[in-house]
Amino acid sequence: MRVWVAAARPRTLPAAIAPVLVGSGLAAHDGVYRGDTFLLALVGALAIQVAANFANDVSDAGRGADTADRVGPTRMVAAGRISPPAMWTAVAVSVAVAAAAGVGLFVIAGWPIIVIGLASILAMLTYVGGPLPYGYRALGEVFVFVFFGLVATVGTRFAHGGSSPGFDAWVLGTVMGALATAILVANNVRDLDTDARAGKRTLAVVMGRDRSRRLYAWLVYGSLVVIGAAGLFRATPVLTALAALWAPFAVRPVSVLATTDDPGRLIGVLGATARLQLLVGATIGMAAAFS
């Protein structure tokens, strides 16, 4: 069980949880919140994230990207702890769970949920899998921003009310997307050297370490500036500006990423960024609900 939990990469799961909290908070603000929608959206988002992590584990192992000199959480297929067929079975089970949640959301909100679900599954499978994996072509951050930010936040809000989300959902989706992208940037900066040797052209490999560090800082601090300004100028419910008060929790991960090349220390940056996103997302969700 510990092996499977590790393969699910629990440190990355806040990227799936936070936008559901934000979209559901907006639904409560708009008077259309549904408890069943919240639970189904949360299960679906987590299942897609876990499926992506399982698929990345087995696909990277097959392409030789997870080598013995890599520093970081153990990749279970590359380490021989889980066989490729077993991992692909786990991917299929996770996708089935996500699909079941999607059916429930379809009953509530209609056919756009099917489009969102199919697009999310396709994006998950082709990240490092298939003949043209976009994660190997410096496009991973773009897709994470879109699917773990805009799609997840706006889609959750839509699922509650079945109506077109307002401008505030898109603004908050941008905030969630920036923080989710920062998690991936931190991960790829940590793995930059081993990825480059394996021919995995992540955005960090293409941009280099220094520019990737600056991108990370812009994503983290920029998201906090946006949420503070959006709340103060009423582009989002006013109390959502309180989420900017988590800024002190951003200082250490930004500083560590900017000053060290030690992959061991950079593991903590990924976890700290994920926790920051969860704190910001939970604060936004509760603030929107009570605004």
Image (cartoon, helix red, strand yellow):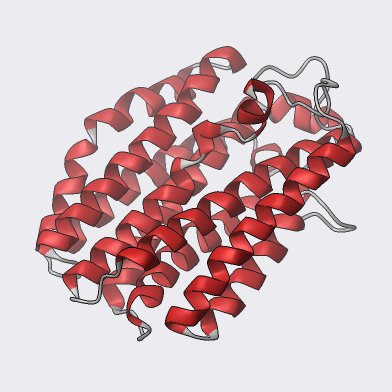
Q: How many marks?
A: 0
* 134 up-or-down from 220: above or below: below
Q: Nearer the viewer, residue 181 or 17?
A: 17
The residue sitting at 37% across, 34% down in the picture is 275
Q: Position of residue 171 (x, y in %)?
A: 32, 66
Q: At 60% across and 60% down in the image, what residue appears?
A: 98
Does residue 46 appear left or right of residue 92 in this picture?
A: left
Residue 36 shows up from this direction: yes
Between residues 194 and 21, which one lies in front from this camera angle?
21
Point out residue 160 in the picture as x, y percentages from the top left corner: 34, 74
Horizontal arrangement in the rendering, residue 119 relative to residue 199 (left or right): left
> At x 43% / y 80%, what residue is drawn?
108
Q: Is residue 39 above or below residue 189?
A: below
Q: Is residue 280 above or below residue 154?
A: above
Give the residue at x 60% y 65%: 100
Where does the C terminus fall, quadrant-wise?
bottom left
Q: Quadrant of the N terminus?
A: top right
Depth check, front residue: 46 or 101 = 101
Q: Is residue 7 left or right of residue 64?
A: left
Q: Is residue 93 above or below residue 234?
A: above
Expressed as whole percent of the image width and height from the top left, the position of residue 204 reads: 64, 39
Which of the pair 185/148 is nearer the observer? Answer: 148
Is residue 232 visible from the viewing direction of this image? no
Left or right relative to 279: residue 274: right
